[in-house]
Amino acid sequence: MSPGRPPARPPSAPEPDPTADQATKDAMSNATTVSPAHSASTASTLITDITALVTNDPSLGDNSPLGLIRDAAVVIEGDRVVWTGEASKAPATDNRVDAGGRAVLPGFVDSHSHLVFAGDRTEEFNARMSGRPYSAGGIRTTVAATRAATDAELEANLTRYLAEALRQGTTTFETKSGYGLTVEDEARALRIAAAHTDEVTYLGAHIVPPDHADDPAGYVALVTGAMLDACAPHARWIDVFCEQGAFDGDQARAILTAGRAKGLHPRIHANQLSYGPGVQLAVELDAASADHCTHLTDADVDALASGRTVATLLPGAEFSTRAEWPDARRLLDAGVTVALSTDCNPGSSFTSSVPFCIALAVRDMGMTPDEAVWSATAGGAQALRRTDIGRLTPGAYADLTLLDAPSHVHLAYRPGVPLVAGVWRRGVRVV
Ligand SMILES: [Zn+2]
């Protein structure tokens, strides 16, 4: 957002997760009692000499949507931020970390990934980038490999990609099932994912699997019946790939509505490869996010601007398939809230790097560096309807990324350079 441009919607607008909200309130009340030089249970740590601190609170610092504070400091205690401001005004603490005149921003919130899978699709990518036809089965290839893998293999794969993402500054991630497509395989994917994140999405409706190719209606009945029953206990969200060749608008509506009846909140893969009903269905059902949004009519943009549904853009997919970019500028100018995520998956976007997506969004999708950084932090949080992440203000989780750079702008200015020099997750330095 250029100076003075308001956020599409205030970062405080999303519906808070009830449990997160309570936790936030608890931490906020702690914040009023901070200066615990001798805290009984948790030491406080001052991170100071931050040349530019992104808080995502427009009431702070330069009053931009990023709430950028110069010569700043942050105090963390336990797993929360308890104080944010100018370094010269920081309270006394037990410990002190010198950021060395570098930039700090909230940990990235990657609100869209597909990390429970086995195998890879190197040959498919190589053929696509070499202009050669490739007839093997795309998602079906990954489904076959995933079904054949053991639980331990799937978990080891997931853990590896999470560590990779963490090194690049991602402190919260959402991930999905969708490569099992049987009752047992979908439920185990979600069980494995739930051991590593609260943001777990049931995507039994990724494609119609080959074993149901002649009976798509029967597969939708399974996804909304026995598979949903087995998966709902392990997930927070339900998703559907609403696209020609996957699931149409009526099927998507039936799937998301059935999920909602079981307590899952909807999100949707919408309008990625072609125009279609996905985006407007997302807004109608108050989905937290419509993801991809590459092919949009004016009515689609108007619908997004009028509702609470975030448009999550996934430029890794367009990069890796040489497809047309989503038009972030058009969405932002219409007042739509935009999130940026990786879509990390073995077929169409095999990157776990949010900084890479920020660079693409700035270079090719019309976003300013400030907008892209906001969308990859606060925007991702809003796409998950969370108020306790994606910002660095009292009460938020102490999820911070330290850059080996004087400004967050370097994330786009120095593409491909490993700038992440430190990561704190839930108050613990992990990188
Ligand atoms: Zn996806």
Image: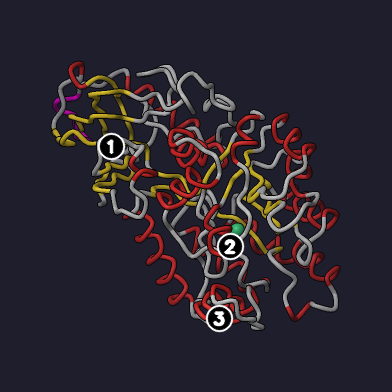
Residue 145's mark? 3
Mark sitting earlier along the chain (3/1): 1
Residues 202 and 2: in front is: 2
Crowd around label 2: few <14 · some 14–19 · many ≥20 (10 Å): few
Q: Hey, what amino acid is under mark 3?
A: Ala
Neighbours of disc 1 within 10 Å: few (<14), some (14-19), many (20+):
some
Residue occupying the point 32% across, 45% down: 425
Circles 3 and 1 in contact, beta carbons < 8 Å:
no
Q: Amino acid at mark 2?
A: Arg
Q: Does residue 264 appear in this view?
A: no
**Mark 1 vs mark 2, CA separation in Å:** 44 Å
Name the outermost residue toward the front. Answer: 131
Q: Position of residue 175 (x, y in %)?
A: 53, 57
Q: Which residue is mark 1?
A: 78
Specify the quadrant of the image occupied by residue 129.
bottom right
Mark 2 lies on residue: 322
Where does residue 148 sit, x and y in percent of width and height? Answer: 55, 83
Q: Marks 2 and 3, Cα distance to the nearest angstrom?
A: 25 Å
100 sits left or right of 157 in the view = left
Q: CA distance from mark 3 to mark 1?
A: 41 Å
Mark 2 or mark 1, which is nearer the start of the sequence?
A: 1
Q: Looking at the picture, tell me which residue is in the foreground, 26 or 292.
A: 292
User: Would you say residue 43 sits in the magenta stretch?
Assistant: yes
Which quadrant of the view contains residue 47?
Answer: top left
Residue span colored magenta: 36-46
Residue 59 x %, y %: 42, 17
Q: In this rendering, is residue 33 above or below 169?
A: above
Residue 72 appears anywhere in the view: yes
Ligand 1 is within 8 Å of the C-beta of the residue at disc 2: no
